[in-house]
Amino acid sequence: MKDHSAFHPQLDKRRRYGTLVAGLLFAATMLGLLVLATLIVDVVTTGSGWLSEQFLTGYPTSSPETSGIWPAIVGSLYLMLIVAATTVPLGVGTALYLEEYAEEGSLKRIIQLNITNLAGVPSVVYGILGLGLFVYLFDMGSSLLAAGLTLSLLVLPIVVISSQEALRSIPQGVRESAFALGATRSQVIWHHLIPMALPGILTGVILSLSRAVGETAPLVLVGASLAINFTPSHLLDDFTALPMLVFQWTEEPGASFQELAAAAIIVLMAFLLLMNMTAILLRNHFEDRLAG
């Protein structure tokens, strides 16, 4: 068989160009992974010596040896509960409306464009919005509720977009078959679309929560405490969170506080890793149920 590539120098040139691009992309990927691995190793080696039961269950103090992060852990968990309670119904409901109810037209395109743009707005802008809207206008003060609602605004566009993608991935034939058998639109949504889209929706929600738990700028702007010696008991209490403690300790003089910040980062990374693993397990669980 003849080698047709000899008669097509342009094809041979494209292959060499493709190989070069693939090599550059691979090198860029390896460089990014190397930098990430270096940072993780540096944080772990710096802060692992401070991890202890006292560190996890203690309260922040002026002495590094007796400082702990328990109020920050509780504050971060409360924030995640507030964000989940607001973004899941609003985000999934918005996605269902846009995909299943809204008619094609200029209004839908404007809404979709704004949601897409809001997903790329810097977090500090949402912090300014939360400061003016929740802290001052609604007089919530520097409370858990104000911070949780601000973070909800931050991740809501992401939840909407991920839920829309999950709904779009469902074949149109599923809807048409259900309608042909006499099902109403609400029955199609509740009994077919939501169960089938649930793996993608849950993955998007949990990854959005993972982003929210690591945000610092909105918390700084709404007035979260850098360090408190109590755990919040209701939604209008003052609070702190893990990113805030990391922010505070990195500003303190002395190597001990820098090591404390590294230890808090390890806990935060473990929290994020746990949430991401939960997203993967839930997605696999519901995909297996649908396949069965």
Image (cartoon, grey):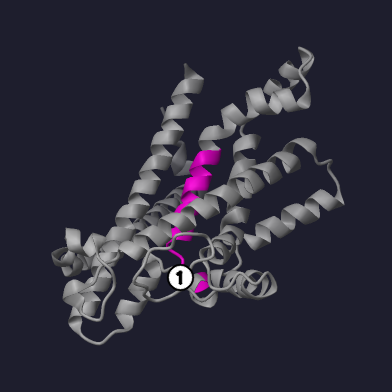
Picture quarter containing residue 135?
A: bottom right
Q: Is residue 42 above or below residue 273?
A: below
Question: In the image, is 21 to the left or to the right of 135?
Answer: left
Question: Is residue 172 visible from the viewing direction of this image?
Answer: no
Picture quarter containing residue 244?
A: bottom left
Q: Magenta part of the protein: which range?
A: 201-218
Residue 28 locus on image (x, y percent): 37, 61
In the displayed image of the protein, which residue is found farthest to the left? 49
Question: In the image, is 57 to the left or to the right of 108?
Answer: left
Quadrant showing the N terminus: top left
Question: Is residue 223 visible from the viewing direction of this image?
Answer: yes
Magenta segment: does it hold 215?
yes
Rate crowding at label 1 as few (under 14), some (14 to 19) or many (20 or more) other CA atoms within 10 Å. many
Query: Which residue is pictured at 34% across the width and 47% down the height?
Result: 274
Residue matched to label 1: 216
Q: Describe the element under mark 1 as helix, strand or loop.
A: loop
Magenta segment: does it hold 257?
no
Q: Is residue 45 above or below residue 13?
A: below
Question: In the image, is 232 to the left or to the right of 119?
Answer: left
| Secondary structure predominantly adopted by residues drawn in magenta | helix
In the displayed image of the protein, which residue is found farthest to the bottom? 253
Residue 78 locus on image (x, y percent): 45, 56
